[in-house]
């Protein structure tokens, strides 16, 4: 089929504005393309709480059953729960209906393979090609698949997280948390997990109804009204989830936004205290993780940006933990999908074990400042930009694994095209925010010249 105008089609799925670029026709065709890729088989389908998800669910179910798939519908669920259900049910793959952190008018489809991971780039490219060429799979009337509900996935996920943390230690710490689920899919599981840990919990947006109380991406700006509530409720920690619950931002007991970058760093701190092993982060993630790994004598590897790339590298090096600076923690004991719930458990475990407040734990970490910028730039201009940057700073170490990354002893710059939006991302980190901002400014100047 020819994709609707404005629909973002990539190796990880599709995303667009409902009723404009994302239509039931596109959702059905993409589901049929995945069914063709797997040759039918058992499939898992979940969705975040967006109201448009129910409409798209019908289209996805039609596409999969028309391809001869046996569908297990797990309902509204977090994205990592879908991956866990795929593995538990030994399915051929899965679809999560979500637009992740995009605003309310958006929705999309995220694809999983039989290993419970987001599809690799190669597999995703095959599904994308099938979709763009209209090569879905349509079986005869007597081979059409069936749909059944599977509602045990949330408890399965909760149990798996509880198995990997020191539950008695957390229960005895008497901690109090504030949970901002913002109407996203992770509210019920977040509450269930915290209740199991006997963490006294208050919060907002627990119902997974897709009604966002603020803009969905858990950034400092979007959480400006939430952060003070953590202190007002006398919580020890605030957890903020994105709509499909594969990202986790933290707020400390004073109401200060800690952010997404340090979610992974704190999880790494706890994990390496108990087991030594390599970790993997992406090219745009804070070097504080490298410093923590070095402290424990462990290797820190970098992968191209993207959950699938991090997961691939984790398997390659046998990593015990990985993730991205967007609040995504990948723990292979749970699954190779960004999982905020194991992130919550690891951070709570760190607090309970050390007896320190979240603000104190953060104060012990190396201090870096990340500045992020983005520009709408034709991709054909990027080779010229990369060449200009390497000539400007010949002393920097050059890495072209994913766009261009330049490294100095205490700072770095990463310039790369987005996988999901028609923009170029520019990210820099340095001990001083002004220095990181200056690196980004140079890129902007070159682009505008």
Image: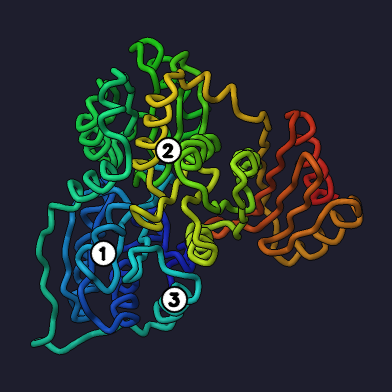
Packing grade of label 3 (10 A; few <14, some 14-19, many >=20) is some
Q: Residues within 10 Å of mark 1 (few under 14, many from 20)?
A: many
Q: Which mark is residue 427?
A: none
Q: Nearer the viewer, residue 279 or 393?
A: 279
Foreground label between 3 and 1 = 1
Tell me which numbered mark, 3 or 1, is placed earlier along the sequence: 1
- Distance Cα–Cα, label 1 vs label 2: 22 Å
User: To which quarter of the image does residue 236 belong?
Assistant: top left
Q: Which residue is mark 1?
A: 86
**Number of residues whose C-alpha sits closer than 10 Å to that of mark 2, classed few (under 14), some (14–19) or many (20 or more):** many
On screen, residue 382 versus residue 361, left or right, reads right
Residue pictured at 38% horizontal, 47% vertical? 339
Judging by the rendered image, the residue that carries numbered circle 2 is 248
On the rendered image, what quadrant is the N terminus found in? Answer: bottom left
Residue on which the image places disc 3: 123
Q: Position of residue 146 (x, y in %)?
A: 10, 73
In the picture, residue 58 is in which quadrant?
bottom left
- Residue 307 point in image, percent of width and height: 48, 57
Above or below, 395 against 201 in this view is below
């Amino acid at each position: 089929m020819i994709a609707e105008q404005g629909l973002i089609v990539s190796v990880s799925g599709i995303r667009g504005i409902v009723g404009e670029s994302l239509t039931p026709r596109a959702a059905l065709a993409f589901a049929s393309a995945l069914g063709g890729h797997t040759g039918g088989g058992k499939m898992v389908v979940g969705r975040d709480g967006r109201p448009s998800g129910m409409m798209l669910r019908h289209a996805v179910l039609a596409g999969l059953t028309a391809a001869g798939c046996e569908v297990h519908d797990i309902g509204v669920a977090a994205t990592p729960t879908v991956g866990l259900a795929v593995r538990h049910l030994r399915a051929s793959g899965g679809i999560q209906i979500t637009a992740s952190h995009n605003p309310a008018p958006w929705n999309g489809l995220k694809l999983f393979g039989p290993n419970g991971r987001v599809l690799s780039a190669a597999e995703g490219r095959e599904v994308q090609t099938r979709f763009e060429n209209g090569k879905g799979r349509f079986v005869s009337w007597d081979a059409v698949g069936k749909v059944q509900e599977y509602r045990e996935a949330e408890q399965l996920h909760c149990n798996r997280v509880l198995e990997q943390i020191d539950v008695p230690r957390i229960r005895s710490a008497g901690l109090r948390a504030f949970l901002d689920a913002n109407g996203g899919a992770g509210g019920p599981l977040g509450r269930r997990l915290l209740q199991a840990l006997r963490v006294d919990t208050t919060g907002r947006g627990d119902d997974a109804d897709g009604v966002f109380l603020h803009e969905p991406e858990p950034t400092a700006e979007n959480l400006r009204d939430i952060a003070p509530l953590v202190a007002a409720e006398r919580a020890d920690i605030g957890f903020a989830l994105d709509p499909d619950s594969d990202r986790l931002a933290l707020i400390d007991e004073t109401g200060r936004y800690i952010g997404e970058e340090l979610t992974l760093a704190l999880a790494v701190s706890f994990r390496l205290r108990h087991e030594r092993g390599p970790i993997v982060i992406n090219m745009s993630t804070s070097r504080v993780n490298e410093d923590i790994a070095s402290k424990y004598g462990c290797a820190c590897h970098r992968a191209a940006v993207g959950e699938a790339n991090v997961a691939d590298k984790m398997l390659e090096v046998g990593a015990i933990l990985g993730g991205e600076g967007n609040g995504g923690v990948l723990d292979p004991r749970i699954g190779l999908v960004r999982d905020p719930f194991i992130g919550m458990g690891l951070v709570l475990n760190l607090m309970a074990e050390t007896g320190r407040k979240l603000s104190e734990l953060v104060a012990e970490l190396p201090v870096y400042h990340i500045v992020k910028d983005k520009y709408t730039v034709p991709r054909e201009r990027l080779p010229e930009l990369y060449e200009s940057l390497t000539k400007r700073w010949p002393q920097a170490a050059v890495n072209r694994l994913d766009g261009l990354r330049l490294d100095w002893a205490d700072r770095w710059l990463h310039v790369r095209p987005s996988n999901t939006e028609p923009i170029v991302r520019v990210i820099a980190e340095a001990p001083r925010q002004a220095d990181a901002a200056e690196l980004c400014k140079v890129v902007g100047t070159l682009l505008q010249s």
